[in-house]
Amino acid sequence: MKEIMREEFITEEIELYKEQESKVKTLNPPPRLGDMLKVWGPAWLVMIADVDAASVITAAQTGSVYGTKLIWFLLLLIIPLFVIQELAGRVGAVTGMGLGKLIRKNYSKHTAILAAVPMALVDIISYVVEYIGAAIGFQILGISPQISVPFIFIAHILIVYKRKYSEAEKPLLIISVLFAASWAVSAFLTARKGIEVTPFYFSGSTDFLFLLAANVGAVIMPFMLFYQTSATAEKGITAKSLWAVRLETAIGAIVSELIMIAIVIATIGVNKDSLDFASPRIFSHGLSFVAGTFAPYFFGIGLIAASFIALIVISLGSSWGVVEALGWDRKNWFKVYLAESIPAVAVPLLTLNLVNLALNLMVLQIAVLVGPAITLGLIASNKKLMGRYYLKGFNKIVYWTFFILIVATGIMSMFLLL
């Protein structure tokens, strides 16, 4: 009798163990390519949008003035880019809410507005830069701003108007492949003639430090935090797919900085005076002299794709952030989208002077990043809200260390501007 009871007890223990093991597998499913493809989009697109027109100008200035001397620094920037954006994706997946809504619910409406509205105002300048960047790209291909700018505006409105996020991101994913390929070809056309590689370089000069700060500003921008949290939640990605979100973010961070390096290489040897984006003809001649006849066309295509993707991603991130912060119905996001976008359309029809505006914008982004980055870190550290996925230990130290370093770079660059 005792033997039978013992066997029944062991059988029950085995069944209980199998049930617990099944639950663990449900919470932590084994990685599968199909699952990865289902969630692919938000992290990749925000990383591609990170290389917007302003970032392209920053990288082009870096390559023209310093050649390969800052490539080591661009490679280092992969780490903070991944750390900060991974946290944005994690918060979106675990909470199912965008950053603006989370700030409003966990702090106050005023705090949410202070985090979102400055970003929205700076993003209006970003839209101007994106439209100008796309206009320059088209002008390199021989199409005037009077034709290209209205076309860009209508095209990006058609992609997002009355579409679900999962539908709107599909054409952007296709464009992102063209975007990456064009920069790879641009870099090859310059590098095939041979370039001098400098493993490490540093200078205390004002110009060097300002360009260093501009590259930091180009790597993390406020809209990226709002976009990745909201887009992750909007797509219905949950905590069980966090492994896929992290992998996508890592791949995106690496590709994003490799594209920046490709742009740096593509502009090595271009005379600084030729790097005049206000005069696409002069720039084309300068690039052709260094990399051959076809180089300007690939550069133009890359600049158009960069500007177009960034225009949509920045607009979505900004409008989602504002609507969530104000507590408005989510349906109102398109009104904010239009209100921010329309004023920017007129500027490229008046001027294409982009270089100084782009570099100063990159530095300004660091100051505007402070509010969203602090609240993201605090929300992610909330164990009650994030459960077992909350920010803790070594990861927490790394996140705040990178945040402090980025802000310190911004403060230094502000003094350089004075």
Image: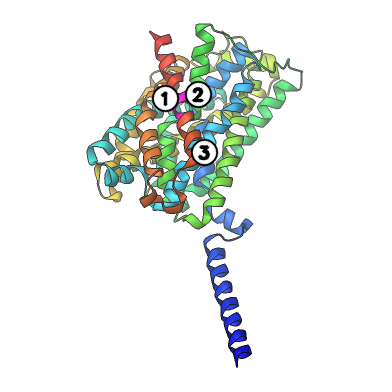
Whichever of labels 3 and 2 marks the residue nearer the N terminus, that label is 2
Q: Which residues are magenta?
A: 402-407
Q: Quadrant of the N terminus?
A: bottom right
Q: Which mark is residue 216?
A: 2
Front in this rendered view, residue 329 or 22: 22
Q: Is residue 82 magenta?
A: no
Secondary structure found at label 1: helix
Residue carrying label 1? 366
Which circle marks residue 394 in the picture?
3
Q: Amino acid at mark 1?
A: Ile
Determine contact: label 2, label 1, CB under 8 Å.
Answer: yes
Q: Residue furthest top?
A: 205
Location of residue 143 in the rendering, given as x and y in whole percent from the top left corner? 52, 27
Q: Is residue 140 above or below residue 95?
A: above
Q: Residues within 10 Å of mark 1 (few under 14, many from 20)?
A: many
Q: Is residue 270 left or right of residue 334?
A: right
Please state, as top left, top right, bottom left or bottom right, where the C terminus lies in the image.
top left
Residue 403 shown in magenta? yes
Q: Is residue 256 above or below residue 320?
A: above
Residue at horizontal 64 percent and vertical 26 percent from the top: 262
Q: Are marks 1 and 3 in contact (CB under 8 Å)?
A: no
How far apart are the alpha carbons under marks 3 and 2? 23 Å
Q: Is residue 78 visible?
A: yes
Q: Nearer the viewer, residue 309 or 34?
A: 34
Q: Residue 235, how many percent across, how many down? A: 45, 53
Query: For the residues marked 1 and 3, what is the alpha-carbon distance in whole angstroms?
Result: 24 Å
Q: Is residue 74 left or right of residue 325?
A: right
Q: Amino acid at mark 2?
A: Val
Main SS class of the magenta portion in the image: helix
Instruction: Answer few, some or many: residues within 10 Å of disc 3's Cα (few below 14, many 20 plus, some between 14 and 19).
Output: few
Question: In this view of the protein, can residue 358 be seen by the observer?
Answer: no
